Amino acid sequence: MQEPDIDWQHLPFGYYPTDYNVRCTFRDGKWGEIEVSTSDRIDMHMAATSLHYGQQLFEGLKAFRGKDGKIRIFRLEDNGERLRSSAGGILMEPVPADIFRKMVLMAVKLNERFIPPYGSGASLYIRPLEIGISPSIGVRAASEYLFIIMVTPVGPYFKTGFGCTDICIMRKYDRVAPRGTGRFKVGGNYAASLVAGHHAHELGYSAVLFLDPKEKKYLDECGPANFFAIIDGKYVTPKSDSILPSITNRALMQLAKDLGLEVEERHMTVDDLTRATEAGACGTAAVISPVGKVVDLDNDTTYVISKDGQPGPVCTMLYKKLNAIRNGEEEDIHGWNTIVE
């Protein structure tokens, strides 16, 4: 197996071409045979429902080469479950659990030479994608769907190290509608957040901490990630039907319990930020992006979370522990890893 010509220590967090992707098509009421492709292109009708009516969803998970040389995929089954939930939310055909699992394992094995070495800080990013491919000019669900697993090696999210960034609150933008698609991992949610994110970056902030779209009273998502804070020694994270149930956040909540912290999923108001001693955005890409301060631009108020500008002890402990489990450095007592044989 020829090693790719990649400088693993300087690999960016972006797309890098690999050898294969794995595909399966739903047609005539059933999923077909799994196919292996070397093409990075899709031949699709110009009237496909994914292009016109947003019938598109995706997932994101990672594979790691561990300290013992074994390859681990983190929370494979949970991502498949969320993918099926998203499909139900926008009337797409859900991918059966056995097909999802088989295709993920195939894609990882076929592209094994692109899994970064242990200790590089890099990983193999796995992107499952489902799109409606049957043509329709009337607004209706597709009858045919294409499901693809593509992979790409990615470098660590934090190029400058695990450190704090500042975020802002802007009430002029909504990420999703009340009772809309916020709890599903569909592309439209991310498209809707781009303008707000661009505006925040222009002002020098890493992300927007969105408020609930109905009352503008409760904390929602932080850019494309879940938000949490350490308040009165508790791990507190917003609970809402408009928030994507982050698999990383679920893992962090469990690890917080393992460490003896009380965990609360509840409505969080802006005022809760006055009592937060630590905070972070969490997701597959970065695990935790610690927050230094939150600036409410509408009310000209700054909530200083980190007094010294450094990640707090709980964020640091959770970040290191989750990475250790994914890399096979600590025992996986919750059975989150799938070992690739």
Image (spheres, rainbow, N blue to C red):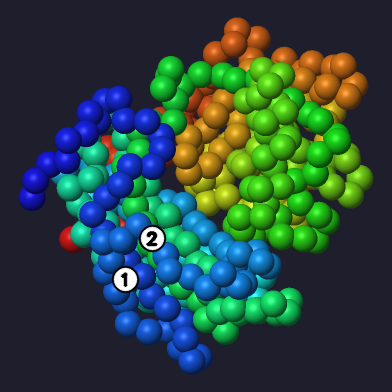
Q: Amino acid at mark 2?
A: Arg
- Give the answer, above or below, for where 335 lies relative to 28: above
Estimate the x, y position of residue 230 in percent, counting from the top left: 65, 29
Quadrant of the rendering where the C terminus is positioned: bottom left
Can you tell which quarter of the image residue 281 is in? top right
Viewer-side residue, 198 vs 189:
198
Nearer the observer, 188 or 305: 188
Q: How many residues crowd around disc 1 within 10 Å: few (fewer than 14), some, or many (20 or more)?
A: few
* Residue identifier under label 1: 102
Dot 1 or dot 2, earlier in sequence? 2
Q: Which residue is pictured at 22% across the width and 28% down the height?
A: 7
From this viewpoint, is residue 331 visible?
no
Q: For numbered disc 2, what is the local secondary structure?
A: loop
Q: Is residue 176 above or below residue 14?
A: below
Residue 273, position as x, y percentages in the image: 77, 26
Q: Secondary structure at mark 1?
A: helix
